[in-house]
Amino acid sequence: MPATFHEVLFPLDIALKSAGGPERRTDIVTLGSGREERNARWAHSRRRYDAGYGVKTLDALGAVVAFFEERRGRLYGFRWRDRLDHSSAASGGAVLPTDQVLGAGDGVRDTFELSKSYGGAFAPYQRPIVKPVPGSVRVAVDGGEVEEGTSFICDTATGIVTFLSGHVPADGAAVTAGFLFDVPVRFDTDYLEVDLSAFAAGIIPKIPLVEIKP
C-alpha cells in the first residue's frame, strides 16, 4: 500500500454493527435479438460499508470523529474488520493452516501471496488478501504446518508469505495457509455531518467507507 495508509484498525465495537458488502462493475449490452452481452469491468470486487449503524452513543460518535480527523477525511487509508468475512475458514470456523491453497512449490520460489477462494466448480473467485491480522497466519507445506519465524515470515502490510532459507517448498509441494484478515479502506467523504439533535432522536449518521485496491 502507498505511504498514505495507516496500519490502524477502525474501532472494532463500532465496525461489528455496520452495513455493507462487495460491489462489482458489469457492462451489459442488450442485442437486437433480446440476448445480452455481459462484460466484467473489474477483475476484483470492491467493498463498501456504512459505519454509522454501529454508532449508538455519544462516546462512540466522539471516537469516530477523532478517527476521522486523524485520517484527514479521505486522505489516509486504514484497516476495517468485516464482520461477515474476515477469516480464511468457511462459515467463521477455526483457522487451520490448510484453509486456502496459495500455490505449489518449485524448489526455488520462496514467496506466496495470501488469497481466499470463493465459490466452487463454475467460476471460483480468488481474492487477494493484503491485510492479514498480525499473529494469525498459519502455513502448511504438503499438509504439515510450519512455524512462523523459523520456516517463514509474513508481511502483514502486504499479505506476502516469504519462506526462509532452507525451508523453500520442494517442487510440487502444496502450500496452504489460514488467517484472519482486515479490509484496506478509506472514508468515502471529506465531510462528516454530525447532527446531535437528530442523533438523540435515534437517527444514525452516515459514515461511508470504500475499499482501497492494492
Image (cartoon, helix red, strand yellow):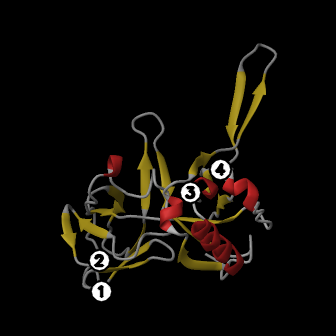
Picture quarter containing residue 26?
top right
- Residue at image location 20% in from the left, 68% down from the top: 145
Tag 1's secondary structure?
loop
How far, Cα to Cα, is label 3 from label 4? 12 Å
- Residue at image location 48% in from the left, 51% down from the top: 126
Give the residue number, with chain letter if any, for mark 3.
54
Picture quarter containing residue 207?
bottom right
Give the residue number, with chain letter if any, for mark 4.
202
Between label 3 and label 1, give the one nearer the viewer. Answer: 3
How far, Cα to Cα, is label 2 from label 3? 44 Å
Q: Is residue 47 above or below residue 191?
A: above
- Mark 4 residue crowding within 10 angstroms, few (<14) / some (14–19) / many (20+): few
Give the residue number, with chain letter if any, for mark 1.
165
Side (left or right) of 167 relative to 10: left
Q: Amino acid at mark 1?
A: Ser
Who comes first in sequence, dot 2 or dot 3? 3
Residue 179 at x, y percent in the picture: 35, 64
Q: Nearer the viewer, residue 84 or 23?
A: 84
Tag 2's secondary structure?
loop
Q: Which dot marks residue 40? A: none
Give the residue number, with chain letter if any, for mark 2.
168
Q: Nearer the viewer, residue 188 or 109?
A: 188
Q: Looking at this view, name the residue that lies furthest to the left.
A: 144
Q: Is residue 53 above or below residue 130?
A: above
Residue 201 at x, y percent in the picture: 68, 51
